Amino acid sequence: MIEEVNFNLEIAEEQMKETITHLDNVLSKIRAGKASPQMLRTVIIDYYGVSTPLSQASNITTPDSQTISIQPFDKGLINDIEQAIIESNLGFNPSNNGEKVIINVPPLTEERRRELVRQVKSEIENSKVSIRSIRQKANDEMKLLSKSGLSEDLLRDAENSVQKLTDSFVVKIDEIFKSKESDIMKV
């Protein structure tokens, strides 16, 4: 019986870790005013008939905090890269100098920063809802185990373990929010 309890706890913890990973991925797409190669992670180009992530067909660097430089492995891709960036709706206006594609990342206005913080808060709340849903599923599994012979004391201990796990992940989510908020609001 204890093995099943531990197994359910491990599943809940793994699902909560996946929620944190998803949150990190979503928040990495929300730019904080500084140029980052991560901003272009979702850009896909047509590389000789194959849909390829931009990062696999070029070298992406940030020479300074407001510029992204994209050096394609094949210079014939420069126009395709520019077009893919425009079509990705990231709000960038790329240019090229014949050798590489250059994106100037404009600084954020105060209003835009506040809007981004609201967007981050929404994603944070979605993650917390997901964590609480995982907690509920884990507790339901524990209750099913109690019907098949798990004692009340072990059930209570298992539910307490699930709650501690939930609390630790909610704290992690709050830390992620504070970090991202300060990053966005920093001028």
Image (cartoon, rainbow, N blue to C red):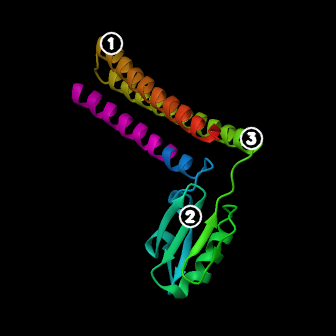
Identity of the amino acid at label 1? Glu
Label 3 and label 1: CA atoms lie apart by: 54 Å
* 60 in the magenta segment: no
Q: What's the amino acid at mark 3?
A: Glu
Res 78 → quadrant: bottom right
Residue at (62%, 66%) from the top-left corner? 103
Placement of 186 over or under 148, stated as above or below = below
What range is drawn magenta here?
1-23
Secondary element at tag 3? helix
Q: Which of marks 2 and 1 is nearer the N terminus?
A: 2
* Residue 78 showing in the rendered view: yes
Q: In this view, does 92 lie above or below 1?
A: below
Name the image quarter holding the N terminus.
top left
Above or below: residue 111 compared with residue 161: below
Local SS, label 1: helix
Residue 128 in view, yes or no: no
The numbered dot on residue 152 is 1
Q: Which residue is drawn at 62% across and 41% down?
A: 184
Q: Residue at x 51, y 43 (%)?
A: 23
Location of residue 139 (image quadrant): top left
Residue placed under numbered mark 3 in the picture: 110
